[in-house]
Structures are given as structure tokens and as C-alpha cells.
Amino acid sequence: MYIFNDKLKPLAKKDIAYKTFFEYFTNNDYTIRKILNNNKVISVLYTSKKFDPENLGFIVEYNSEDISVLNKFDITLKAEKKWLGEVVDFIKLD
């Protein structure tokens, strides 16, 4: 992974040993809906490309230093609730 400045000059190169990061980003079963970066943690909201009325997707938090997985949160609804798929979003409160 490369880090660039606002003029696209490479500032640093980091080796990423955690393939989970790549598995989520390259898996064609999921769509990335939102990415939040607070300089310490990168939070990514993934939703399934296949409509599932009970499983909305998941959020993964990555350490921005080495892209290791800090947390993974599955977003599911109880059987009596159904998601119609119009809107999925999240905010992060620090």
C-alpha cells in the first residue's frame, strides 16, 4: 500500500500482511457503501450484492497503520423485521 500527498507524490510504502483486507475488497459478493477514516481507524461498510432481507452486511474496522482487522460487526435483523434495501448508512461516534 502506498501513501500519497495531495500532489500524488508517494510519501511511504507499507507492506500489508493481512489478506482479510484484500478478501473483503476483492470479493465480488459485496459492495462497499461507505468508508470513514479518522487517521487511526478505517471503518468500511459492506453490503451484499445478493438481496437478503435479514442480513444487511457488515462493518469492518481496520488499524490505519498496518491494515489489520480490529473489529467486524455483522448487521442483521431479527426474523420479524425485514430490510427492503433502500438505504444503508452509518456514522462513527468517537
Image (cartoon, grey):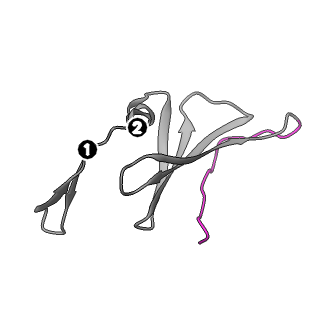
| Quadrant of the frame with the C terminus | bottom right
User: Foreground residue, 35 or 62?
Assistant: 62
Relative to residue 36, is residue 15 depicted above or below? above
Give the crowd class for mark 1: few <14, some 14-19, many >=20 residues within 10 Å.
few
Q: Which residues are magenta?
A: 80-94
Identify which residue is drawn at 53% across, 42% down. Answer: 46
Judged by its main secondary structure, the magenta piece is loop
Q: Residue furthest right?
A: 80
Q: Is residue 77 left or right of residue 8?
A: right
Where residue 15 is drawn, which disc sits there?
A: 1
Based on the displayed image, in which of its 4 quarters is residue 42 positioned?
bottom left
Q: Is residue 70 left or right of residue 82?
A: left
User: Foreground residue, 85 or 38?
Assistant: 38
Give the crowd class for mark 2: few <14, some 14-19, many >=20 residues within 10 Å.
some
User: Foreground residue, 37 or 81?
Assistant: 37
Where residue 25 is drawn, which disc sits there?
A: 2
Q: What x and y, as percent, mark residue 7? A: 12, 68
Exactly how many numbered labels are in the figure? 2
